[in-house]
Amino acid sequence: MHNKSFCILGPIAVLTLSLLGPAPVHASAILPGTLPNTLAKGDDVSSSAVALGFGASGINLFGQTYTSVYINTNGNVTFGGPLNNFVVNGLADGVGVPIFAPFFADVDTTSAGTVSYGNLTVNGRTAFVVDWTGVGYYSRGTDKTNTFQLALFNRADTGAGNFDLEFNYGQIQWETGNANGGTNGLGGISAAVGYSDGKNLYSELAGSFENGALLDGGSRALIANTLGTSGVAGRYDFQVRSGQVSVAAPVPEPATLLLLIPGALALFLLGRCRRPRNQEENSSAL
């Protein structure tokens, strides 16, 4: 990997932590609904371009307009082209296309699980949803399985091309495929969670690449924590407005502004971004 500098989560997410406190207990953050399409079973599989169903205006992501998306077995969706990579080297190096990755790792559905996708209506809004349900790890791992979800919500009501993004988690039992140095789904180069423009702007959730951190019961367990405004354990909310990704955060009452000082400690607990040293002005963070 290239040498990188590090930065920590911005004030918006700090305020979110300060106001929300610990995530409440919740059976599952996964949005219900039957999705009409299923990706072929296998390892390192990608779909062809799939229409988002948001109309001709599509979405604005990092200044580009997209009306379709590619579904990739390995825990992510990409825009402008598919991504078959399974070697997790961060979301900056070698990605090449804009990506949202709820769980970027070496998923193998040959013997366990399915990847399904399509449109749902959620709370009156059109959503494009991808479910990774009970998926195993490479090679043909079935003793541990993961269930997680990505949802894009059309928010053209707030401006052309705007949308909301959710990462939702139901179960995370493994973190690594065998080709990434894992043993029985654990250890080695573990999974990354986050997004990238495919060039130099990217952000990864704290716990990415930390063995055991994102697993159920881990120090940063995906099913036990939350980000954004929902307060639902296992749900991570983002807004994309005018092409830029940010954490969805509530507007504070004046009295709650006092929480910002102790809340600054949350900067070290929730997230960080990593970027090339010569491109610091283009970075963003979860």
Image: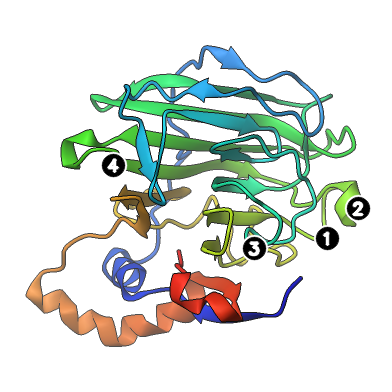
x, y percentage for residue 5? 60, 82
Q: Secondary structure at mark 1?
A: loop
Disc on the earlier residue, 1 or 4: 4
Q: CA distance from mark 4 to mark 2?
A: 41 Å
Rendered view: 177 above or below 50: below
Q: Secondary structure at mark 3?
A: loop
Q: Is residue 147 left or right of residue 12?
A: right
Q: Which mark is residue 183?
A: 2
Tell which residue pokes out farthest to the left in this image: 254
Answer whether labels 2 and 3 touch (C-beta < 8 Å): no
Which residue corresponds to the image point at 61% horizontal and 30% vertical from the top-left? 71
Q: CA distance from mark 2 to mark 3?
A: 18 Å
| Residue linked to disc 4 | 162
Q: Give 238 or 49, whichever is nearer the viewer.
A: 49
- The amino acid type, in three-letter code, at marker 1 is Gly
Crowd rating for badge 1 (residues with CA inside 10 Å; few <14, some 14–19, many 20+): many
Answer whether labels 1 and 2 touch (C-beta < 8 Å): yes
